Image (tube, grey):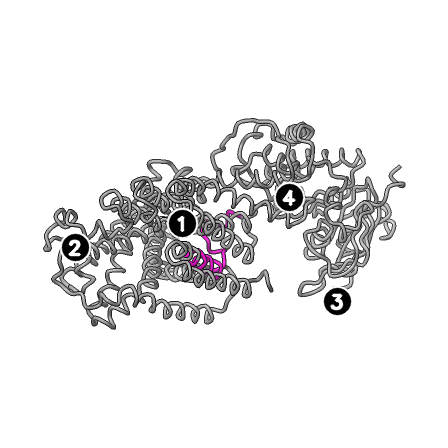
Amino acid sequence: MTRSASVTWFAGHEIRLAWREMLGMLTAGRRWRTRSASIVLVAFVLFLHLPAYAVVGRFADVAMPLDRSSLIVITASIFLAWALMLSQAIESVTRVFYARADLDLIMSSPVALTNVFSVRIAAIAVTVTLMAMLLATPFIDVLVIGGGVRWFAAYAVVVAIGMSAAAVAIAVTVGLFQLCGPARTRAVAQVISAVTGAGFVIALQVAAILSYGTLSRFAVLTSDVMAAWAPDAGSRWWWPAQAMLGDVAALLPLLGGSLLLLGAAMAVFSPRFSDYVASVSPKIDARKTTARAFRPGSRQGALRRKELVLLWRDPWLMSQTLMQLLYLLPPALMLWRSFGEGAGAFIVLAPVIVMAAGQLAGGLAWLTISGEDAADLVATAPLPSASVTRAKIEVVLILIATLFTPLVAAMALVSLQLAGVTALATVIAAASATSIQLWFRVQARRSQFGRRQTSSRIATFAEAFVSIGWAATAALALVVPTVAAVTALMTAGVMALTWKISPARA
Amino acid sequence: MSQQLPPALVLRGLTKRFDRPAVDGLDLTVRAGEFYALLGANGAGKTTTLRMVAGLLRPDAGSVSVLGIDALANPVAAKQLTAWVSDEPMIYDKLTPLEYLEFVAGLWGCDAATAERAAHELLHSLGLAAQLHERCEGFSKGMRQKVALAGALVHEPRLIILDEPLTGLDAVSARHVKGLLQARVAAGCTVIMTTHILEVAERMADRIGVISAGRLIAEGTLAELQQQNGQGDTSLEDMFVALVENAPAAA
């Protein structure tokens, strides 16, 4: 096989793997026909045009020249997208080092490893960009329809930031290898990946609370201070925003620069990639725990203890939990800062807390209920399966109660009604998310849960809708109780529909 | 004395069908205190049979009795007396061997102090004394298999079901495991084991059953099997190959 042929062949192999991985994410690992999955995907993207119109429809006429505040908002939005793509790319690079089953085959094959890993780096950039493109398409389409073909340039901006995100992700991961060593890089990279996406938004919210007493991140971006601090309109910092608005003079250097960055990453890191991969020893450093006596207790108690220890020792889960807790940082900060200003200032906190509780409960329930490394052992243990499930649910609720009780207690000092409504909605949201994960449980080992692709897409979306529904209900119950009854009924309806289509009912 | 006890396992008309019959009306009796080796080619139905006995699969038809307990009607009571070890050790990477055994003992409702003593003895006898407090995530397959086996034994089961337990074990570890199992049988425990290592069955088993296409096609002591198959000095391997090759195909 010629050198170019082997590179082309390997690129085809990578694209096939990436496509199947994406299908796996969409179908939650179940066997679907490619055509059915494609139809569902297209239908989903078409559906997304509706919320996209609601969000960006009114900005379709925006054109250059723009004032500084608008440039700041657009640039910050592009940076947020870049941060999210960087997060996904770091996760992908980590999997190349640690989780790809074909590495032994590739490294023992008679091919030039530099070429192979160059292709793999390019594949990461393509995958990250395609995923971003998929999510950005409805928004860009709405802008094109409303504001003209100049908005097509936004697709090129997505490509540019996708390439640069992949390049930076590789540099970050390799840097972690040098800094922390192969054994710790995986956990550190997972935490960085989880925090990168959320960190920017949360930082803006924290700044908004500290400066303006509001949760809105736009308060900072559109402030006079930010406008005064920002560079001139002719600065290169605005190239991404200008490129997005169709300015070819800004778009071309942006694309060229990103391509150069990715090329440099491939040239610098590909020759060393095999060394990095080879340094990831399959033998993990032995971690010791201190000796202690066996503890007496019930069978359910043993299960609860095991679940808590496993959750505590799981770095991936810790990073996910950390991210959920980061979302709680702004409301907690606002609660602390605005204390004493009356209940009205805190109503905005109720939905944030309820939403976070629902999402965290869903994530924990998915791990504890579906993720069981010793399924045979638990199934052959002398206790009914209902007792096992109950113990796992108890662990989820204990953790939710531990994390959220302090916040609700602080709210109770401001207003008992506010605290009561928040507590009730938090319990309902957590119970709902847990129930959905129970109805859609897919038994698998936790090591297979590197990402939530083993979880059903329907369950993930239902969980999100239900959390949003209960969060809205909590907020409305404090302001317009009659309307809250309507949203509560709608959310209960979503729950009923989810149950109806769940495998548990079948 | 063992004759007064109910049989460790009685299967009657046990049937399980996937896309084809995996277990086809199987009748099998294993006496209490016996070391029983269940042999068969790949796909013969051994693992499916044992998974039904362990309560991991529900049979389509038939009955399972474990030490006189109807395992289908009263699975919790049957499981209290049973241990299951599969060829793929299922343990928790983030727990140490001692923590794993503590969890297993907790699940079976064992006394904590007694279980702790038993856990230390088991792990020492299996050569894991140096790894008592190390998380299992860095263990080799053989070490994981030993941890899983210790977990199966820590709650003092009366019926131990093992599906290819020696897979991945080195010669020294395999000898440790075999010694441990023989000690349990000597103490009155019943062991049912599938294995592809016929020498192990030949040396250790009191009786051997050969299964093909979900049915028992031969059963007895090694001497009985040799007698049934015509020649007194025929090796188990030769008998096994002849039995499997001459067995009628699945329906």
| Relative depth, front residue between A392 and A354 | A354
Quarter in which the C terminus of chain A is drawn: bottom right
- Give coordinates of residue A47: x percent, y percent: 38, 69
Pick whichever of labels 2 and 1 is earlier in the sequence. 2
Q: What chain does badge 2 belong to?
A: A
Mark 1–mark 3 Cα distance, whole angstroms, equals 46 Å
Kindly identify the amino acid type of the residue bearing the numbered disc 4. Answer: Thr
Does dot 1 land on a helix, a strand or a loop?
Answer: helix
Q: Which residues are magenta?
A: A446-469
Mark 3–mark 2 Cα distance, whole angstroms, equals 77 Å
Pick whichever of labels 3 and 4 is earlier in the sequence. 4
Is residue B45 among what the camera can see? yes
Kindly identify the amino acid type of the residue bearing the numbered disc 3. Answer: Ala
Q: What chain does badge 1 belong to?
A: A
What residue sits right under mark 1 in the picture?
A96
| Relative depth, front residue between A381 and A447 | A381
Mark 4–mark 1 Cα distance, whole angstroms, equals 30 Å
- Give coordinates of residue A292: x percent, y percent: 57, 27
Question: Residue B167: which numbered mark, if any?
Answer: 4
Mark 2–mark 1 Cα distance, whole angstroms, equals 40 Å
Does dot 4 land on a helix, a strand or a loop?
Answer: loop
